Amino acid sequence: MVKANHWSKIASSHPLRTHHLESFIVNVKLNETENRPTVPDALRPDNPEVRKGLFKLYRDFFDKAERRRRWSVADDIPWELAAKPTNPAIADVIESFCAVELYLPDYVAKAMPLVRTNRGWSSFHANWGYEESKHSLALADWLLRSGSRTEEQMADLEGMVATNEYHLPQDNAVGMLVYAMIQELATFLHYRNLRRVAQTQADPALNKLLGLVSVDEAAHHAFYAEVVQFFMTIDRAATLEQLRRILVTFQMPAVHLLADSQKRVQAVKALGIFDQDIFARDVYLPILKTLGISHRELRRGT
Ligand SMILES: [Fe+2]
Ligand SMILES: [Fe+2]
């Protein structure tokens, strides 16, 4: 459960919204003892309406991705221009992001059974896995080619990821959908903001790489947001109940499994890449706006 000071901090960074956010905290506390909401049959992946809707959304996403967003790790990044950053914290953060991306086997294998009865949804997940696999490849290549890490250090990183297994934060497909919508936006911001920091380094390879990766993450978020909006047309209250619960407990995936996880989170904060204020301003509020939900409606859960 989210700590009270987390939301107090968000509230203080948004003075106009302080009253609403404080009320929200109270409401969350009141519901702490409630059981997790059950997912209605209408939102299950095998509901024919959900199958049909997801397939259409996936085909649109896939066709657009094929036309506009495919890129090559080998050919589209000017690797010969990769340079060791003057600020070693940049390489440390890239190593952390690479490690989180390296948990892909768990992200794919553990979520796929939840959606296997839905062709569009499972195909999206397979395609998503392909796109995500390029992210760890490109980040690892940069760590090596810039001279920031050795082959041995990269082997140690892979070993650490292989040792600690990641478990899904939600136990049902709708919960994972809502979680992924939030997580992809947060991940986009991590890369976009890191790119802004890295632009001080005159490294065209890193700049291009972070641009390509952040466009992928934005596309993933946009797809999930469309699916959540579709689910809201089927059962708005049940979808919002998932959203309300997951928004207030959100954490980035897998970071806690890494060695020195606190230090890694601190490094991200110290570079101004991501923190609770950025979450409130650039994730929480924009998601409500995208979905057309008022804070009051989310708080009520109706
Ligand atoms: Fe990624
Ligand atoms: Fe992504």
Image: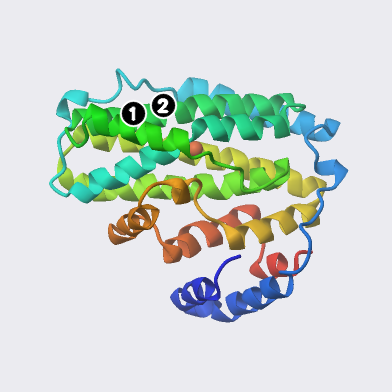
Left-right relation of 224 to 216:
right
Q: Residues within 10 Å of mark 1 (few under 14, many from 20)?
A: many
Q: Is residue 168 above or below residue 295?
A: above
Q: Secondary structure at mark 2?
A: helix
For the point 21% across and 31% down, the residue is: 150
Residue type, numbered disc 1: Ala
Q: Residue 235 location, x and y as percent?
A: 81, 50
Q: Residue 166 location, x and y as percent?
A: 54, 41
The quarter in which the C terminus is drawn is bottom right
Q: How is the image coloured?
A: rainbow
For the point 75% across and 28% down, the residue is: 118
Residue ranking furthest to the front: 163
Residue type, numbered disc 2: Lys
For the point 31% across and 41% down, the residue is: 95
Give the label on residue 134, or none. Answer: 2
Give the label on residue 123, or none. Answer: none
Residue located beneath label 1 in the image: 138
